[in-house]
Image (spheres, rainbow, N blue to C red):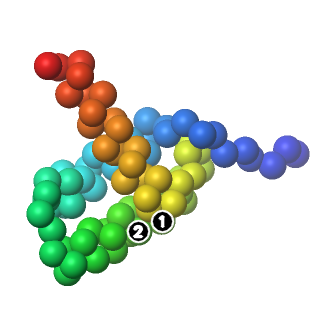
């Protein structure tokens, strides 16, 4: 049996999970001027969702900064398509 290989592409399941997480934690995507305490809280939440997303059987495997960047990039694409 061949070992499962990770994809560089985010799976639909991962995207849905990320979307639900961000709906529940909107504070980590909408803050601009952030104190050190808020930044640490945001980092902690990104680490939490990173464990969940990376534990899925298929899809991308990223560190917390990678998932955060993915969301910023994805959000930018959505804005371009709907502006």
Expressed as whole percent of the image width and height from the top left, the position of residue 14 reads 43, 45
Q: Is residue 7 left or right of residue 53?
A: right
User: Between residues 24 and 78, which one lies in front from this camera angle?
Assistant: 78
User: Between residues 63 and 24, which one lies in front from this camera angle?
Assistant: 63
Q: Quadrant of the C terminus?
A: top left
In the rendered image, is residue 7 in sight? yes
Picture layout, residue 35 above or below residue 4:
below
Residue pictured at 38% horizontal, 69% vertical? 48
Q: Residues within 10 Å of mark 2 (few under 14, many from 20)?
A: some
Picture layout, residue 36 above or below residue 73:
below
Query: What is the C-alpha distance between the residues marked 1 and 2?
Result: 6 Å
User: Between residues 13 and 26, which one lies in front from this camera angle?
Assistant: 26
Residue pictured at 41% horizontal, 68% vertical? 47
User: Which mark is drawn over residue 51?
Assistant: 1
**Local SS, label 2:** helix
Residue under label 2: 47
Picture layout, residue 25 above or below residue 9:
below
Q: Is residue 58 left or right of residue 22?
A: right
Picture layout, residue 8 above or below residue 65:
above
Residue 5, by quadrant, is top right
Residue pictured at 14% horizontal, 57% vertical? 32
Expressed as whole percent of the image width and height from the top left, the position of residue 49 reads 38, 62
Front position among marks 1 and 2: 2
Expressed as whole percent of the image width and height from the top left, the position of residue 12 reads 43, 36
């Amino acid at each position: 049996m061949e070992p499962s290989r990770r994809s560089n592409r985010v799976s639909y399941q991962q995207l849905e999970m990320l979307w639900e997480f961000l709906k529940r934690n909107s504070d980590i995507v909408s803050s601009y001027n952030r104190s050190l305490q808020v930044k640490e809280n945001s980092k902690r939440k990104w680490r939490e969702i990173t464990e969940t997303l990376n534990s899925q059987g298929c899809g991308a495997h990223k560190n917390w900064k990678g998932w955060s960047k993915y969301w910023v990039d994805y959000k930018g694409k959505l804005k371009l398509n709907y502006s």
